Image (tube, grey):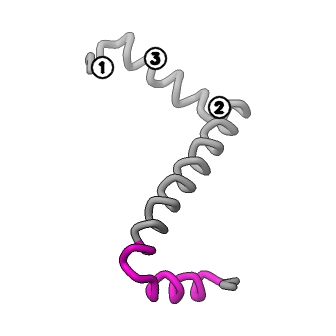
């Protein structure tokens, strides 16, 4: 079993194309879930409050546009 980044890299490099595709799909899902968890944590702890307030100020100043 791979225990270091170097070992993981070597193992991934040796995967056949079909397994590499499967790994890529798994990793994208895994990475997105980790990112979502971090954003939720940052929201709950107030780390994003200053950014949100700056965005609101910019919006009220006419510095935003409809998407």
Looking at the picture, does residue 18 appear above or below residue 35? below
Report x, y in % for residue 44. 71, 30
Q: Give the Cα distance between marks 1 and 3.
A: 10 Å
Q: Residues within 10 Å of mark 1 (few under 14, many from 20)?
A: few
Farthest right residue in view? 45
Dot 2 corresponds to which residue?
43
Secondary element under disc 2, as helix, strand or loop, is: helix
Looking at the picture, does residue 46 appear above or below residue 25? above
Report x, y in % for residue 10. 51, 89
Dot 3 corresponds to which residue?
56
Closer to the camera in the image, 38 or 48:
38
Which quadrant, please, contains the C terminus? Answer: top left
> Quadrant of residue 61 in the image?
top left
- Residue visible at 64% across and 45% down in the picture: 38
Secondary element under disc 1, as helix, strand or loop, is: loop
Dot 1 corresponds to which residue?
63
> Quadrant of residue 13 in the image?
bottom left
- Going from N to C along the chain, the mark reached first, 2 or 3, is 2
Q: Residues within 10 Å of mark 3 (few under 14, many from 20)?
A: some
Which quadrant, please, contains the N terminus? Answer: bottom right
Q: Residues within 10 Å of mark 2 (few under 14, many from 20)?
A: few
- Going from N to C along the chain, the mark reached first, 1 or 3, is 3
């Amino acid at each position: 079993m791979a225990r270091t980044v170097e070992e993981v890299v070597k193992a991934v490099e040796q995967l056949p194309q079909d397994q590499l595709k499967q790994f890529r799909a798994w990793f994208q899902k895994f990475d997105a879930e980790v990112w979502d968890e971090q954003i939720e944590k940052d929201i709950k702890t107030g780390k994003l409050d200053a950014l949100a307030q700056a965005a609101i100020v910019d919006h009220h100043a006419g510095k935003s546009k409809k998407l």
